[in-house]
Structure formats: C-alpha cells, structure tokens
Amino acid sequence: MGESRRCVTLTTDFGTSGPYAGSMRGAVLRANPEVVVVDNTHEIGRGNIREGALVIGCSFASFPDGTIHIVVVDPTVGSDRLPILVSTENHYFLAPDNGVLSYIFQHEEIYNVVEITEDHFFNKPTSRTFHGRDIFAPVAGWLAKVQDVGRFGEPISEYVIERFAEPVQVKEKAWKGEILFIDPFGNAITNLTTDHIPGDENGYPAVNRILTLRGEIRQVRTFYCERTEDEPFLILGSLGYYEIAVNGASAAERLQLAPGNEVGVILR
C-alpha cells in the first residue's frame, strides 16, 4: 500500500447500531481523506479492556506495515487517564492508557510511547465523553500525513499494563493455563500454545486429557468438522492458541466456560 493510502483500523466496544462507529470513521476521513479506514471490530464487550487488548493483539499483524490502529475501550473516558500514541517497528496504536494495549506492550518491541497533548490536532469542541471521535480519530488522520510521533506530544516511560497469566508447568507432562477469550462462535481460547503442547506426527495436540471446571475432555482435532460427534475437543486455532471447541455449537455455553477459568493439560 502506498504512503498516500495508509490504513487506519478501528477496534471499539461501540457496536454498530448507533452513531459512534460512523462518527469515528468520519473524523478520521475529515482529517485525512486519503486514508483507508477499516473496521476491525466494534463488538468488544462493553468496557472489557482485557478483551480489547487480546483482540487487537491477535489481529493487528494481519494489516499492512505502517497501519495506524485506534483502540477505544474506554470506561474511564473524561478522567485523568492519558491518551497515548504507541509505535512499534511496523505499526502505530492510539488508545487510552488504561491497559487496552497490554498485549502489545507485552509481546512487541516498543519504540515510543507518547502522551498526546498537542490539542490543535483535536476536533473542536472536544467532548469529554467521546475521545474516540475528537482525539484519537483526527490524530490518526494527521499521523498518516506527518508520520512523526513527536509532533503529537512528549514521550512517557510509565503506562498501564494488565498482566495476562502465563501457562505454568506443574509437572513434567502437565501444564496449567487459563481461558483468555470466548470468540463469537463460543470457542474458548486458552493461553496455551505449541510451546506448551506439541503436536504429534499427524498434527494433533499431543495430550491425554484436558481438565476444566466442568470435567475432562479427551478429544483432539486438527479441524472443526473432522468428526461428526458433538463432543468438546482441543484444537490449535488460527490465532496460535489452543481452543476448546464444539463443532456447530458453543463450547463456552456447553461447558459453562468463561475468561479466567483455569484449564489443565496432561500431555502424552
């Protein structure tokens, strides 16, 4: 993508039925009609900072280098929390400093974190309750033009990071993880990866059993409809994490699973 058609993504908890998502798109384009605005999602759970952090962390790398990502899950909008601009090697992130960029901070090399203070880039008047439209969106449009984070404020060295639990090896062939996220299909995304659960020679998760609050799971698969029975199973998902799933149904509903629930894995 050429420099004149830089991409701006939107990740929010606004939903799509009201004026908010559209107002953000318009504010980006008003500042810079040459950008491409992409709705990553507006369906983050209301005020769910943790979910927002995971979703942007798992999706941003699918976009072209140089993309500017606006992430607004902001239950404390109007308070003294800071608006920040974060740059990594190939991407930029605009968000409230409330932990919604925690996944980025923990997994990416951070080049700069700037408190956005230069209010001549903001929409005027600037609403105390809609910084997505009046601060983050116009700053994204201008950033696509000037491509200089120093124009928007001063660097800061302290910012909010919500620590996500890492899997723990409890025995030689046993790991304890947790559920990070329930996706729209009801699949329970865990924090377990191939670093913790290897695949066997046929690509199946090399586990004997999976332990949840609602009992054991012994089925493993390499794709969702591999077999016809509707029992829960473990599968390596496209995000790079192991998932507990039920083909054609919601594993979260079937097993009453939720983010934060512990998951045990016994390897073969």
Image (cartoon, grey):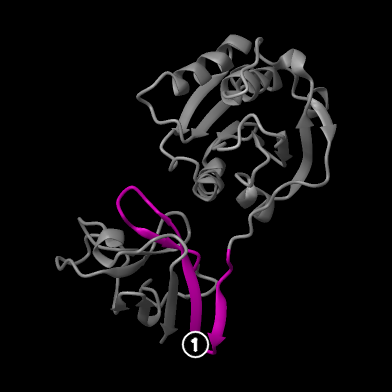
Q: In this picture, is 238 found above or below 228?
A: above
Q: In this picture, is 238 found above or below 27?
A: below
Q: Is residue 167 magenta?
A: yes
| Residue under the image location 63 percent in, 25 percent down | 136
Q: Nearer the viewer, residue 28 or 15?
A: 15
**Image position, residue 22 (x, y; %):** 45, 18
Q: Nearer the viewer, residue 62 or 156?
A: 156
Q: Nearer the viewer, residue 71 or 245?
A: 71
| Residue under the image location 54 percent in, 37 percent down | 73
Residues drawn in magenta: 165-192
Q: Seen from this angle, which residue lies furthest front?
A: 79
Amino acid marked by disc 1: Lys
| Residue under the image location 67 percent in, 55 percent down | 106
In the rendered view of the protein, which quadrant contains the C terminus? bottom left
**Image position, residue 266 (x, y; %):** 42, 84
| Residue under the image location 52 percent in, 41 percent down | 62
Q: Which residue is mark 1?
A: 173
Q: Report the side of 198 relative to 123 (left or right).
A: left
Q: Is residue 83 magenta?
A: no
Q: Is residue 246 visible?
A: yes
